[in-house]
Image (tube, rainbow, N blue to C red):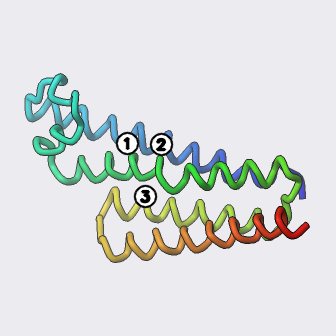
């Protein structure tokens, strides 16, 4: 395996974040125009949420979520690549993480079933924890 292989899921997550940002713009701006919400009310997005419909807020909520857990994923994958630990296990685990996050995004953005979203969140965390523990063992035990 090449270090590039572990970076492909990293860029897939970055593309997901970019796609959700565009999705957010295409839902938020038309809603603000339709509801005649002045852009200045968006100075504090927590206050803006009060004016926007749930289907618009859930997309922006997901956008925010993509800057939480996935940031650790980026750091772990880049560290694995830099340290030369890239192998089949890490690559498949990284793609599993991305798949769970894509599903999480679709659930939150489209239907927002909280229990299903929670299971997807936990599944992605389990994958990430396994990656962290395995990489830590390679660093501390080696």
**Label 1, label 2: how far apart the Cα atoms are:** 6 Å
In screen coordinates, is 72 left or right of 24? Answer: right
> In the image, which disc is placed on residue 19?
2
Evaluate if marks 3 and 2 touch, with contact meaning CB atoms under 8 Å apart: no
Q: Sort mark 2 into few (<14), some (14-19) or many (20+) by Cα contacts within 10 Å.
A: few
**Label 3, label 2: how far apart the Cα atoms are:** 10 Å
Above or below 99: residue 18: above
In screen coordinates, is 75 left or right of 6? Answer: left
Q: Which residue is mark 3?
A: 105
Q: Quadrant of residue 38?
A: top left
Q: Which mark sits nearer the N-terminus, 1 or 3?
A: 1
Evaluate if marks 1 and 2 touch, with contact meaning CB atoms under 8 Å apart: yes
Point out residue 111 in the picture as x, y percentages from the top left corner: 29, 65
**Label 1, label 3: how far apart the Cα atoms are:** 11 Å
Q: Which residue is mark 1?
A: 23
Point out residue 68 in the picture as x, y percentages from the top left corner: 47, 52
> Going 62% across and 70% down the picture, which residue do you hit?
129
């Amino acid at each position: 395996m090449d270090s590039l292989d572990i970076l492909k899921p990293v860029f897939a997550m970055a593309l997901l974040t970019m796609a959700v940002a565009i999705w957010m713009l295409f839902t938020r701006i038309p809603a603000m125009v339709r509801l005649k919400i002045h852009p200045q009310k968006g100075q504090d997005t927590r206050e803006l949420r009060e004016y926007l419909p749930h289907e618009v807020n859930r997309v922006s909520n997901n956008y925010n979520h993509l800057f939480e857990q996935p940031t650790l994923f980026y750091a772990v994958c880049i560290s694995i690549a830099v340290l030369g630990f890239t192998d089949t296990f890490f690559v498949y685990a990284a793609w599993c993480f991305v798949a769970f996050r894509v599903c999480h995004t679709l659930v939150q953005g489209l239907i927002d079933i909280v229990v299903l979203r929670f299971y997807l969140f936990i599944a992605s965390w389990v994958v990430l924890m396994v990656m962290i523990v395995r990489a830590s063992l390679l660093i501390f035990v080696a």
